[in-house]
C-alpha cells in the first residue's frame, strides 16, 4: 500500500543527510511503528510521506500511485493521508464538530460523516464544546476523528502520546488503537517509546542517523536485533567488552560485537555448574528499589562496574553473577 524507494533528504545541500537511501514497504491494514533516537530522521520521513517536504532523491508510492519523485509531486491535501500531531493542532475558536468538519468541507454528507467519527471516538455528546473544555485525552480523540473523517488511505501518528504522563499515555494508546482497528486504516506510528511500539505495531522500523537499520516484526526485534543499537532500544543491554570477557572467562569471536540483556544475567545462581556457563564474583555497591525489582550496582573483582536487576531484596555484600552462551547477542 505504501512503497518507499531510496528516499533521501538533505537540508544543507548534501553536506549531511537527514535521510539517506531509505526503502521499505507497508501492507494495507498494518500498523508500522517508526522508532529511533532524536535526530534519527523519524519526523523527516513522515513529513516527506505526507508531502510537507520534497525529497532530494527517491520516490514515494501510495496505493500504487507515485505521489513524490524527482519528476512528480502531489500536494499534501491530495494524498489521502491523515495526520495526528503531538500538539493535536485543533482550532481553538471552532467547536469539536466544526474541527472535524474542517477537513471534509467539500464532502456531500459531511455533517453525517462528522457525527459518525465523533461516535467512533466516543465524543458524540461533546460536539458543541470547544477544545479548551476537553481533557488532553479527549482532544487527542478529536484530532483522531478529524484525521479519519476524509477516509484516508494512510494515517500518520507523529509522537501522539509523548506529552502525556505514563498512566494516561498507556490508557489513551489502547483506546486510540482500538478505534483505529475498527476502521482498518493503514498506520505509520512515530514514537520514541519502544513500549508503545511493541504494544500496538505489526512491524517496527528502526532508524539510526537517517538510515534503516532494521524492519521486522515486534517479537523478532527483541530476540534477533541486527545491531547493538537496536538491542539497546528494546531493553537494558550490556556490551561484553574484552574486560568483561576476561572477568567472566568468556572468550568470544574478536570479529564480532557481543552483548547480554540485563535480565539474562543471573544473581547468585543456585547451581553454578548447571545454571551458568560463565560466572564472576562481584560486590554490591548500591541497591535501588524499583517497585518489584531491585537494581544492583556492582563492582567486579576485575574493577569493572555494571548494574543488574533482581527480585531478591536480601542480596548484599559479595555475590556471584553469571550468564549462558545461548543468551549472548552477537553482531558483525
Image (cartoon, helix red, strand yellow):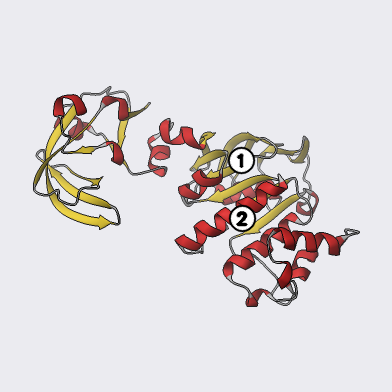
Q: Residue at x 46, y 48 (%)?
A: 195
- Report the side of 31 relative to 300 (left or right): right
Give the distance between the C-alpha atoms of the residues marked 2 and 1, in whole angstroms.
Answer: 31 Å
The answer to whether one can see residue 302 in this image is yes
Q: Is residue 213 above or below residue 97?
A: above
Question: Split into 4 quadrants, where in the image is the N terminus?
Answer: top right
Residue 16: percent from left, percent from top: 52, 45
Q: Nearer the viewer, residue 206 or 53?
A: 206
Which label belongs to residue 277? none
In the rendered image, which quarter is residue 260 located in? top left
Question: Split into 4 quadrants, where in the image is the C terminus?
Answer: top left
Residue 10: percent from left, percent from top: 59, 46
Tally of numbered tags: 2
| Residue under numbered circle 1 | 8
Residue 293: percent from left, percent from top: 27, 51
In the rendered image, which quarter is residue 64 located in? top right
Q: Mark 2 or mark 1, which is nearer to you? A: 2
Nearer-N-terminus badge (2/1): 1
| Residue under numbered circle 2 | 176
Q: Nearer the viewer, residue 176 or 56?
A: 176
Residue 232: percent from left, percent from top: 38, 42
- Report the side of 276 relative to 59 (left or right): left
Q: Nearer the viewer, residue 304 or 152?
A: 152
Callout 1 crowding tier (Cα within 10 Å): few <14, some 14–19, many ≥20: many
- Secondary structure beneath label 1: strand
- Secondary structure beneath label 2: helix
Amino acid at each position: 500500500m505504501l512503497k518507499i524507494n531510496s528516499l533521501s533528504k538533505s537540508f544543507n545541500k548534501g553536506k549531511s543527510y537527514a535521510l539517506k537511501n531509505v526503502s521499505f514497504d507497508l501492507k494495507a491494514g498494518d500498523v508500522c511503528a517508526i522508532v529511533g533516537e532524536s535526530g534519527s530522521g523519524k519526523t523527516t520521513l513522515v513529513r516527506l510521506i505526507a508531502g510537507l517536504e520534497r525529497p532530494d532523491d527517491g520516490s514515494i508510492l501510495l496505493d500504487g500511485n507515485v505521489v513524490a519523485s524527482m519528476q512528480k509531486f502531489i500536494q499534501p491535501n491530495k494524498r489521502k493521508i491523515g495526520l495526528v500531531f503531538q500538539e493535536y493542532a485543533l482550532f481553538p475558536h471552532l467547536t469539536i464538530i466544526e474541527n472535524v468538519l474542517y477537513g471534509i468541507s467539500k464532502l456531500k454528507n459531511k455533517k453525517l460523516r462528522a457525527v459518525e467519527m465523533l461516535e467512533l471516538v466516543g465524543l458524540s455528546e461533546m460536539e458543541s464544546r470547544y477544545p479548551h473544555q476537553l481533557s488532553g485525552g479527549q482532544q487527542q480523540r478529536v484530532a483522531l476523528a478529524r484525521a479519519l473523517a476524509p477516509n484516508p488511505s494512510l494515517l500518520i501518528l507523529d509522537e501522539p502520546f509523548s506529552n502525556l504522563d505514563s498512566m494516561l499515555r498507556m490508557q489513551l494508546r489502547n483506546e486510540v488503537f482500538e478505534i483505529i482497528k475498527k476502521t482498518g486504516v493503514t498506520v505509520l506510528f512515530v514514537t520514541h517509546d519502544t513500549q508503545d511500539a511493541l504494544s500496538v505495531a505489526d512491524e517496527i522500523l528502526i532508524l539510526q542517523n537517517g538510515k534503516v537499520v532494521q524492519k521486522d516484526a515486534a517479537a523478532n526485534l527483541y530476540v534477533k536485533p541486527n545491531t547493538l543499537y537496536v538491542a539497546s532500544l528494546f531493553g537494558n543491554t550490556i556490551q561484553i567488552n574484552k574486560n568483561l570477557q576476561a572477568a567472566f572467562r568468556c572468550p568470544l569471536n574478536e570479529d564480532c560485537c557481543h552483548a547480554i540483556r540485563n535480565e539474562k544475567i543471573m544473581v547468585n545462581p543456585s547451581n553454578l555448574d548447571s545454571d551458568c556457563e560463565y560466572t564472576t564474583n562481584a560486590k554490591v555497591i548500591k541497591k535501588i528499589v524499583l517497585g518489584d525489582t531491585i537494581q544492583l550496582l556492582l563492582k567486579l573483582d576485575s574493577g569493572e562496574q555494571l548494574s543488574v536487576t533482581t527480585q531478591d531484596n536480601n542480596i548484599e555484600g559479595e555475590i556471584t553473577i553469571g550468564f549462558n552462551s545461548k543468551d549472548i547477542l552477537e553482531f558483525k
